[in-house]
Image (spheres, rainbow, N blue to C red):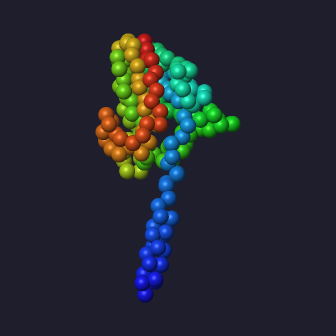
């Protein structure tokens, strides 16, 4: 009887260990390029890119300054595109982020530039995501916009400290004309 209890305990332990597989469907990706796509009135349609071709040391990253002309209107639609250029062909990660929107959050922090950012998309729980935003521009100014993509945030309502891991953290210079 003792032998049966030990065998049963061992079997249950092995099943418990086998059942504790890591969820790899939401693992972090290698992000080498982030594109801010802005559209506005008067035919304004521009893309601004941050790129780190090797996906490692960001000291060789390039950044396009975001310039919003007066002719773009006061309200602009923004869509973020995310890529891994270390793969051939380059992998567009945007759709994956959108599909896994419950475990992703983009946070925008504007400094100096007269630009407001409002979320225009939500996940399955009605929480913000940030792939789609609306930018409202004010008077001429210069500054920057910092964009962070959080993976598995613990509190999507707290934009100052949503928790989780940061997949990317990029800052674009911004000029509002």
The quarter of the displayed image where residue 29 is located: top right
- The mark tally for this picture is 0
Quick check: 4 left or right of 93? left
Residue 115 or 82: which is nearer the viewer?
82
Quadrant of the image for the C terminus?
top left
Q: Where is residue 10 in the image (x, y as percent from the top left)?
A: 47, 73
Residue at screen point 59% across, 35% down:
84
Seen as rendered, the residue at the extreme front is 2
Residue 170 or 132: which is nearer the viewer?
170
Residue at screen point 43% across, 32% down:
148
Residue 1 lies, with reference to residue 51, above or below; the image says: below
Residue at screen point 39% across, 13% down:
142
Residue 127 or 140: which is nearer the viewer?
127
Quick check: 170 left or right of 117? right
Residue at screen point 54% across, 26% down:
57
Q: Can residue 152 be seen in this view?
A: yes
Residue 97 lies, with reference to residue 32, above or below; the image says: below
Q: Where is residue 20 in the image (x, y as percent from the top left)?
A: 47, 61
Quadrant of the image for the N terminus?
bottom left
Q: Where is residue 15 in the image (x, y as percent from the top left)?
A: 48, 69
Quick check: 160 left or right of 165? left
Q: Can residue 74 be seen in this view?
A: no
Residue 31 lies, with reference to residue 98, above or below; the image says: above
């Amino acid at each position: 009887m003792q032998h049966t209890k030990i065998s049963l305990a061992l079997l249950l332990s092995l099943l418990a260990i086998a059942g504790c597989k890591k969820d790899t469907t939401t693992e972090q990706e290698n992000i080498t390029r982030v594109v801010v796509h802005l559209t506005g009135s008067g035919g304004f349609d521009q893309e601004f890119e941050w790129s780190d071709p090797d996906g490692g040391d960001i000291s060789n990253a390039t950044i396009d300054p975001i310039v919003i002309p007066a002719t773009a209107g006061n309200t602009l639609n923004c869509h973020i595109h995310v890529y891994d250029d270390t793969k051939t062909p380059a992998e567009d990660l945007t759709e994956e982020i959108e599909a896994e929107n419950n475990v992703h959050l983009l946070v925008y922090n504007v400094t100096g530039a007269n630009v407001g950012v409002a979320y225009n998309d939500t996940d399955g729980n009605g929480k913000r995501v940030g792939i789609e935003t609306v930018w409202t521009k004010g008077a001429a100014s210069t500054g920057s916009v910092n964009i962070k993509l959080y993976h598995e945030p613990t509190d999507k309502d707290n934009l100052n400290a949503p928790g989780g891991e940061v997949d990317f953290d990029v800052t674009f210079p911004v000029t509002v004309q």
